[in-house]
Amino acid sequence: MKEILNFTVNGDPVSVAVEPNRMLLDVLREQLELTGAKEGCGMGECGACTVIVNGRNVNSCIMPALEAEGAEIVTVEGLLGEDGRLSTLQQAFIDKGGVQCGFCTPGMVLSAKALLDENPNPTEDEVRRGLAGNICRCTGYTQIVDAVLTAAKKGQEG
Amino acid sequence: MRELDYVGKPLPKTDAREKVTGRAVYMNELKKPGMLYGKIKYSDQVHARIVHIDTSAAERLPGVKAVLTGENVPEVRIGFMKDNTPLKKGKVRQYRDEVAAVAAIDPDIAAEAIELIKVEYEPLPAVFDPIEAMREGAPLVHETDPKGAPLTSNKLKLPWKLVCGDVDQGRSEAKHVVEDQFKVTWVSHCCLGVSGCLAEFDLDNNLTMHSITQIPFLAQNDFNAALAAMGLKGKNTRIINTVIGGGFGSKLDTHVYEFIAILLAFKTKRPVKMMFNREEEFLAQAPRQPAIVDIAQGCDEEGRLTFRDIKMVLDNGAYTSWGATTPSVMMVPISSLYRVPNVRYKATCVYTNNVYSQAMRGYGNPQATFAIESMTDMLAEAAGIDPLDFRLINSNRPGEITPQRFKITTCGLRDCLESVADKLDWRYKKKYKQKSRGVGLGSLIHVGGGARVYKSDGHGIIMKIDDFGKVTVITGAVEIGQGSETVLAQVTAEILGVPPEDVSIVKGDTSICPWDVGSHASRQAFVSGNAAIGAGNKLKSQIFELAGPMLETDPADLDMKDRLVFVKSAPEKNMPLEKVLRKAHFSSQGKVLAAEHFYDPPNEMLDREFKGNLSCSYAYGTTGVEVEVDEETGQVEILRYIAAHDVGRALNPMLLKGQIYGAAVMGTGYALTEQLVLKNGRIVNGNFLDYKILTALDKVPVEPIIVEPDDEAGPYGAKGVGEPGCVPSAPAIANAIYDAVGVRIKDLPITPEKVLRAIKEKRGEM
Amino acid sequence: MNNYIYLRPATLEEALELLERHGADAVPVAGGTDVFVKAKRRKVAPKVIVSLRRLGDLRYIRAEEGRVLVGGLTTLRDLEQSGIVADRLPALADATRNMASVQIRNVATMSGNIANAAPSADTAPPLLVSGAEVRLISKRGERTVPMVDFYAGSGKTVLERGELIREFVIPVGRSPYSQAYWKHSRRKAMDLAMVSVAVHLELEDDMETCRLIRIAHGVAAPTPIRTPEAEAQLVGKKIDAETLKDLGETSCGETLCRDSLRGQAWYRQEIIKVMVRRMALLALERARAKTGQR
């Protein structure tokens, strides 16, 4: 039987009816049409579904939707500024070649955001640790790591 | 090299913005009104007769709109040898065999319906080892050929044999000869975007296939053939690509699930979407071709190669996709990596009850190069020559014609070898060797200017320019993440003298876009770049014809740059491009400013002996690695990874490096961690936990070196680079491990267990 | 995946009540990173899920005299980022830092890691070598079980129906001491231990004689285990190359390694021999470094 679920996503309050066995990813993609989060494996093993829940990055494919009750959720769609401008981090992914096929990108960007929110000036090793749960088959990670370090530097400069 | 305005610049990918904002629409996001969800029932037997399939419970389930089996669909033969069908009839030959399929109103109902289908099997003896499969009396995977003629052997009738010079003579001239066996196994593409398609028929029974194919026009051909087999001869397929979540060769064939979606859509008269999950992706997306390689190689006193003799057995699996044709590309390094006058190569493909294989980045080249380049070090050691010197002695040179009749134009191999050695401090490291540390090299040759593996190696472009100077390029190229679209925009901008932001690319629709053979063979930037130059020149001529009278100049004395048309001999005489363009429309008897160009490179189809100039330019490269081996655990740490690539010219250094970084990590995975494990035909590690793609924390410290000999065949001098990076990784790493601890691992992946066992065996401890 | 009733109690009492009421049908779930994966793979089909995520009161890491208390709903990420854990329970810090991914560690709990009874549970060997106790609670009351008695065989624990892990009570070593943990895996992240080794070492004041050592392994037997013979063997001895080599050999002799998809028995044994030595050495170095600081 469906239950009513209330939470905020990218600052907007939402209310949806969900079956208890639905994961947050299903609700975001199918009911809220926030399709930036991807299903790469459905088992928490690739990170393509990463979203930020109450400040922490999680695999939305194995997070029961009902656990989002009252939560503040940020998806990749929420990173755009009000003027439609990309975040520093998104721009760095573009400028440094951190995007190829792009399927891992939204999750990767959100893991990077969660990392930088917590640790604004990470070392390369800390970036690699922070992104280790996001599998990328195209880039070999080098340019992604470079993008995150560049964004961190830009963030430090204000 | 001439400095250019846009080519050679590290411009960001044209599609990066939509991807980084989550707006890109992949197959996963695609929906159509009235759409049904398809799902496939796979065999749970590896080799068995199908006695009976009971679909009645599935058919009764509310929401199910169609249930198909091999018994109630028209026979559609698919695959390179036409030995496969979408739904199996009579028997199953591998675990992934598709025995039934459903279409339902939602994915949960489809999944439930699949569970309700009951299949009764009668198990048959199976064969999993290709050597055993060749023996007399081995269970036959196929009792008949596609036309019904009886078969008596599991060996495929494929002609893979290359003979150049006289190998026996070469062997007798050799002072040093080494022989050994190498094995490479299945690895999976693991595109982050799983496979899927959406098939829909219009009211006239024409098919629109929303697809992630890398080969839209060949897929159109395959699907049209399927339509004919379904009684729809003369009907057409329109392929429309969504954004594609990775390719690496996995979308170079048309796949069983696509044909099933077509059958379901035709049956239900509704759009049918078929979307894999990761489990299905591992199960039913064919991996890289495995091989058993017997190789002998010899050199004379001075270290010059005198012969190379290779025999291979390829486990073909139960059906035939492109994996069985990888010997055609394996021949490239076998005949032409280094100067070797006498070459013999024979490959036998054998049916087994394992999974079948397909194309994957490098198309056989990484497999063959692992054996050849491991063997190069072994031969160098036998001859007492440093592995670097040995490679320099035998390095290919510009202007040579190789035994397979490849005409080498530019050749950066020597530069690659020397620059890698220099950066790696090779001489010093060899002289003052540190315990447990070692350095290793691996080189490569690959086609760099397309490859004529099909009747045409061509690429069509339509280029039009509007009243405001905005350019539209309509291309048959498929962007799979590699960035060919961006490079195409750069080349177009360069040739037309407009900024790249004025260029937009229209792609991914066979009804709109001109023909292209596909995104394969590292050819896309090369062919579409050359096509854009051709179209751009034609378009410029049209513009200059208009501008000539306006500027009172001979059109031949005009050029364009920075959105201006100007007189070459007097650049101060100029006119805004827009003004000229509007003239085309705002005059009586106006004209459309558009040009088409079909570029088909001067590549030769290999002849019956598999000889000919397959590509008009060849890409070279050398990878040098330094490793540290933990002699107590067998674990290998890559300390340095230097990848030099002869790319002709870098069209976009940032995207080029992206290809090198990505390929290096994929190649390192191939070398060290990746393996699709099959137990009696069943994949037992089909998930991202047990199939070990490297993570960001498993750092491969790749240092690219770009070698630019500027090849005249290429667009602004470029060669292809998409595949080469993953070709020499495994032998370079294997050679470095040997240098570090004196053990040679001859089968991939080089796991710590294998390394430790070899170390212990060497010490007599095991 | 099957459907189920999903309950989200706000208090421990409520949770225990619900578990009691739904009996055998109820599956208590903390982070869910294991249960939902198994459910999606159709390996389990829970009927009633009792989510524990709202029990914020059970999420804490507290330092007390001679021990650290970790609440049953504490996440792996909490442990990884805790100064208390880094300082007093270095093996647990080593273990949590290298588990799965940040995303998983942000929701997965130590309770879940232990209660799953997987032989590869990374937090089990550190808890074993620390001599931890597990405080369990159910509607029927509370009890305390030493970690060494927590596993009841392959895939089994002593947890009874309706019972939850309320808290871990983890004694801190007697200084000078330290610990180390090694997870042997093919990748550096997103991987399970092929085999693992935890060492807790306490030294005499001479800083070279072993006063006490505890050694534990994951994936070396059907459950995480201690190797008491090896532990007894080193006590009172000077820690040097010779005694450490023997230590690894003896410890290895007490294991029951098996061949599996993820690793071969002989290789697991080799790693144990090597890593017991290296982890003991690392613990020794850490203990000395820490004493040097003070």
Image (tube, grey):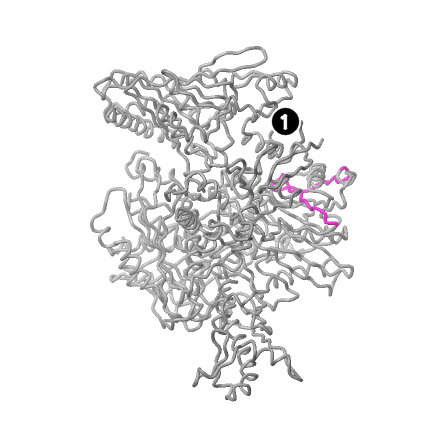
Between residue B9 and residue B566, name the one nearer to us. Answer: B566
Looking at the rendering, the stretch of residues picked out in magenta corresponds to B34-57
- In the depicted structure, whether residue B560 falls above or below residue C100: below
Between residue B612 and residue B715, name the one nearer to us. Answer: B715
Where residue B399 sits, quadrant-wise, is: bottom left
SS at circle 1: loop
- The answer to whether any part of residue B120 appears in the image is no
Q: Is residue B664 left or right of residue C202?
A: right
Residue C268 position within the rendered picture, expressed as x and y whole percent measured from the top left: 39, 30
For the C terminus of chain B, the quadrant is top left
- The answer to whether any part of residue C65 appears in the image is yes
Q: Chain of mark 1?
A: C
- In the depicted structure, whether residue C291 falls above or below residue B30: above
Q: Is residue B271 left or right of residue A117?
A: right
Q: Amino acid at mark 1?
A: Pro
Magenta run includes residue B561:
no
